[in-house]
Image: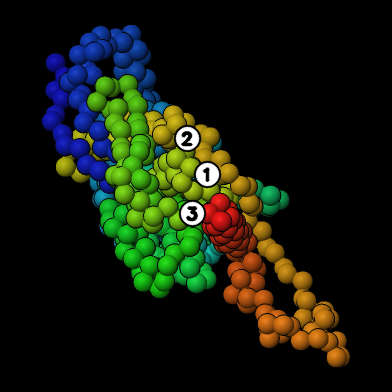
Amino acid sequence: MMHIPRFTRTLMGAALLSLPLSLTAAVEQEPLLPLDDLRTFADVYNQIRIGYVEEIDDSTLLEYAIQGMLMSLDPHSVYLTKDAFEDLQSNTTGEFSGLGLEVGMEDGYVKIIAPIDGSPAAEAGLQTGDIILKLDKQPVKGMSLNEAIDEMRGPKGSEIQLTIGRPGETEPFEVTLKRDTIKVASVRERELEPGYGYIRIAQFQNHTGEDVSASLSKLKEKGKLKGLVLDLRNNPGGVLRASVDVADLFMDGGLVVYTEGRLANSDVRYEAQPADSTDGIPMVVLINGGSASASEIVAGALQDHGRAVIMGTNSFGKGSVQTVLPISESRAVKLTTALYFTPNGRSIQASGIEPDIQVERARVTAYDTSRQISEADLSGHLDNANGDAGRPASRSVNGLLATDNQLYEALTLLKGVNILGLRDKRARAAAALDSES
């Protein structure tokens, strides 16, 4: 008789949600094991034991079998060894050692989902969608995801060479990275222009909701907010509860996200509280192909409720829920147990969030207009009746256009919304006065 150990559920890192699963219940639902298939497995196992060119002990061979079984399910279900289990826990604290890459498997290769802000990978220019072909000249093809991650680990200050394949490039190229302690600043904020705030979330950690709330308070201290840009580009996700907390800050109640799985207790709904911390100011949310998981939850919720304009490019499309199931003190299984859906019932899985306004990242060079002649340059021109000889273009905005065209477009949209809103307010006031007279 098979003994099933008791286990605890842990919420952490790349796992979006820990659901109260019951292995005993699952066994009761499917009491009959496929005996013929199990005999086939035992026969193959025995052939490998006695005939493989190198001797492999039973423990290692069984571990390989477990890894292969999970790898065949989907890119996110994995067997966690002791080191991988510990790394998963450390991701929610915002500090760990490595290259600073969120990765997944695609066609047997390691694909970069997103580089983490300020990491060696980000500073080296690695991008979402890059494929890692080799690690220190060793081909990645044939490695499991855990094996590839193990190769990328190492002491702080040690170097590793990555061979990268990039879509659109005809030849692979090599990048040498120096491993470092990755300190992820989950949230940072700044004022783009007076009245227009910017909040960047690099990763969803345990306290990200509180950090975003604090950032909003800092921006409000500078003056009344007229618009806000929430930047979720290259945010690989993280803790589900944190994404719900963030969406809650900008919503006046309503459904944020819900999950559905095969087991009844995997169906969970998350609601926002009826209190918008920003009083409904215009918002733009920036996303791209590196926006995954928890980022897509926030973008999808705000889009479905009409709370924000989503701008940028299609998100990554990770709409599945992983549950971490410890099977011993040092090992666990990270298993996909459910899918999550936006408030309107859209599944994000493999399709992602489509922006309301598509804006590709591009390098934009503004024309030099400094030599253009205007009326004010003509000899004997009449002065402006208001005593205003003209206002120079904002250098900060022009600089933003050159460095981040997507953020520039977001700011431009927010300013346009405010201009139209002000004109509408004035028109209503004028109409009210006319009706009184």
> Would residue 102 be seen by someone viewing this image from the given angle?
no
Q: Residue 283 carries which label?
A: 3
Quadrant (top left/top right/bottom left/bottom right) for the C terminus: bottom right
Amino acid under disc 3: Met
Q: Which mark is residue 315?
A: 1
Q: Sequence-wise, which precedes: disc 2 or disc 1? A: 1
How far apart are the alpha carbons under marks 3 and 1?
Answer: 18 Å
Name the residue located 63 percent from the left edge and 51 percent from the top edge: 359
Q: Which mark is residue 285?
A: none
Name the residue located 21 percent from the left edge and 31 percent from the top edge: 20
> Would residue 69 be seen by someone viewing this image from the given angle?
yes
Q: x, y (%) of residue 241?
A: 29, 45
For the residue labelled by badge 3, is the local secondary structure a helix, a strand or a loop? strand
How far apart are the alpha carbons under marks 3 and 2?
Answer: 22 Å
For the residue labelled by badge 1, is the local secondary structure a helix, a strand or a loop? loop
Q: Which-is-in-front pick, marks 3 and 2?
A: 3
Q: x, y (%) of residue 107?
A: 54, 36
Name the residue located 33 percent from the left edge and 8 percent from the top edge: 36
